[in-house]
Amino acid sequence: MAEHNVATVESLYEAWSFEGLPGLVRFLDPDIEYVNPGGAVEPGTRTGLDAFLAAAESTQQSWVSWRMFPERLVAIGDSVAVVVRYEARARSSGIAVEGRESALLTLRAGKIVRYEWFHGPDDALRAAERNEPPSRRDR
């Protein structure tokens, strides 16, 4: 199960890079929860596929380009913590930015039911470890 979840998350990021938001739909549960951290352009939780896509589209409007490159994927129970390197170019100023952040994706029946991202590269792994009983961790 853990290997399948990691493969699904890898495929999601690949689709996001090459197909944009329409490429994500096949990986997402219709009732997905999308959680943005405080300090995000649109903080808070949204529920449902349409809400996920609308929030992601709204965020992407600020950028001419935004690419994510997963650097590390760690399966913990039904979740996958991902460290992501990103490269982007701002729409209004043209300034290029890059950095690292993380996300915690929870899967059920092969679909992503929760996508929570964090500003720090280690935050998703810490969140997963806090929420998962030690006996269920896949290392």
Image (cartoon, rainbow, N blue to C red):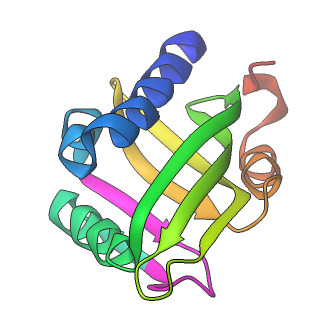
Between 57 and 104, the one lying in front of the other is: 57
- Magenta stretch contains residue 32: yes
* Residue in the picture at 22% in, 71% down: 54
Decide: is 103 above or below 111.
Answer: below
* Image position, residue 111 (x, y; %): 32, 32
Q: Nearer the viewer, residue 97 or 127?
A: 97
Using the rendered view, name the quadrant where residue 27 is placed: top left
The answer to whether residue 112 of the structure is visible from this angle is: no
Q: Which residues are magenta?
A: 31-44
Identify the residue at image location x=59%, y=16%.
2
Q: In the image, residue 30 lies at what x, y percent? A: 18, 49
- State the residue at coordinates (20%, 33%): 26
Q: Nearer the viewer, residue 10 or 125?
A: 10
Query: Which of the 4 quarters of the picture holds residue 32?
Result: bottom left
Q: Residue furthest front?
A: 94
Residue 65 seen from this side? yes
User: In the figure, 51 relative to 38: above or below?
Assistant: above
Q: Position of residue 137 (x, y in %)?
A: 76, 26
Q: Can you say whether 136 is above or below 115 in the image?
A: above
In this rendering, position of residue 31 left or right of residue 59: left
Image position, residue 17 (x, y; %) = 39, 40
Q: Indicate whether residue 34 is drawn in magenta.
A: yes
Left or right: where 22 falls relative to 113: left
9 on left or right of 50 = right
For the point 33% across and 66% down, the residue is 56
Specify the quadrant that holds the C terminus: top right
